[in-house]
Image (spheres, rainbow, N blue to C red):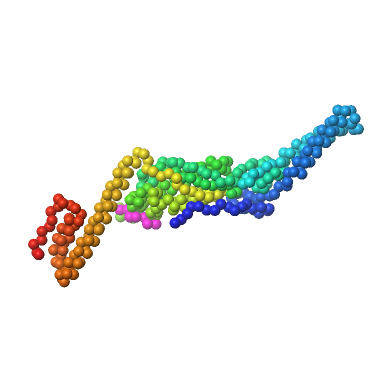
Amino acid sequence: MLSATQSPPTGRPEGNTTIRSGHITEHTFRAISAWPVLATCLALGIAGAWLFYLVGQHTAPSPDLPIIGIACFLLAFFLLKGLIILQPNEAAVCLLFGRYKGTLTQAGFCWLNPLYTRQKLSLRLKTQETGPLKVNDAVGNPVEIGAVIIWRVSEAARATLEVDNYGLYVSAQSETALRLLASRHPYDPTEQQDALPTRDTGTGTGTPAFTEALSSITLRDGSDVLASILLQELQLRMAAVGIDVVEARISHLAYAPEIAGAMLRKQAANAVIAARRVITQGAVSIIDDALADLEARMDHQLPPQQRAAMISNLLIVLIGDREATPVVNTGL
């Protein structure tokens, strides 16, 4: 049985490790601790306040002290702008004057270049519910289908810079992949033959296009395999923007309300036909065994006409058709 579950990435690259894919080359770097910078900012603030206090007391030895005090405050505010706090499984994409400089994944209290433009985003697992959507299956029957997608951002730079909104991108691609999956497979096993496409071979009649035949997996009975197919389709679509799809499962599947009643009656009729087929096959097997035993006791084979008449009569008795008239054979 195929499983749609895959293990999430064990970690992100550190140091100078690069991941090349698409137009963005993501690389991570380690920021310095923010505590020394915070202490420096406090010292600058205290120094600036002390200088202004001296100026206010008219005991300043130099007229440049107010300018120095203002410079201390400005430098402190400039350094404070570089402070950043990252939670576990969180990243910050850093840009400098419109150019990508790196991705910070180091959790904790850190300090970056204050000129960096930073955009935070979560690397945690997210759950996306898609649907229920109304889609036509491979036969053309309207069905309702929904899925649950579990995904995460694996490359923060690509998720931020390759698309305008990666959340909306995941929603749109999930819906598209789910619609495509439903349109390729019939809902019920009894409709598999109708779902096979045909092509004209030049004789005016269509023959099964085996090279283009759709999968024999049905939406109702192939949940694990369909989940695997959906997962692979989503991974292919999401890899371009740094999204890793961890799991995909079909959460809702039903006929559309306008045909649900008719389809239930069709399923009931198919069940009756299948039951009668089993009964008939069992009756034929019993008759074959009975005739074989009779011929063994008589030590010769029955004539074809007599054998056919006995089979017909025994079928009537075993199947229970009391209104039928038994076949009379006078050749006994």
User: Is residue 194 placed above or below 46 in the rendered structure?
Assistant: below
Where in the figure is residue 150, as x and y percent of width and height?
A: 52, 47
Q: Is residue 277 left or right of residue 72?
A: left
Where in the figure is residue 114, as x and y percent of width and height?
A: 72, 41
The number of callouts visible is 0
**Residue at (66%, 44%) from the top-left corner?**
86
User: Is residue 231 placed above or below 132 in the rendered structure?
Assistant: below
Most distant residue in the bottom direction = 299
Highlighted magenta segment, given as a residue range: 205-211
Nearest the viewer among 143 and 165 is 143
Residue 100 shows up from this direction: no
Quarter containing the N terminus: bottom left
Residue 29 covered by magenta stretch? no
**Residue at (39%, 49%) from the top-left corner?**
220
**Residue at (43%, 41%) from the top-left corner?**
133
Residue 209 covered by magenta stretch? yes
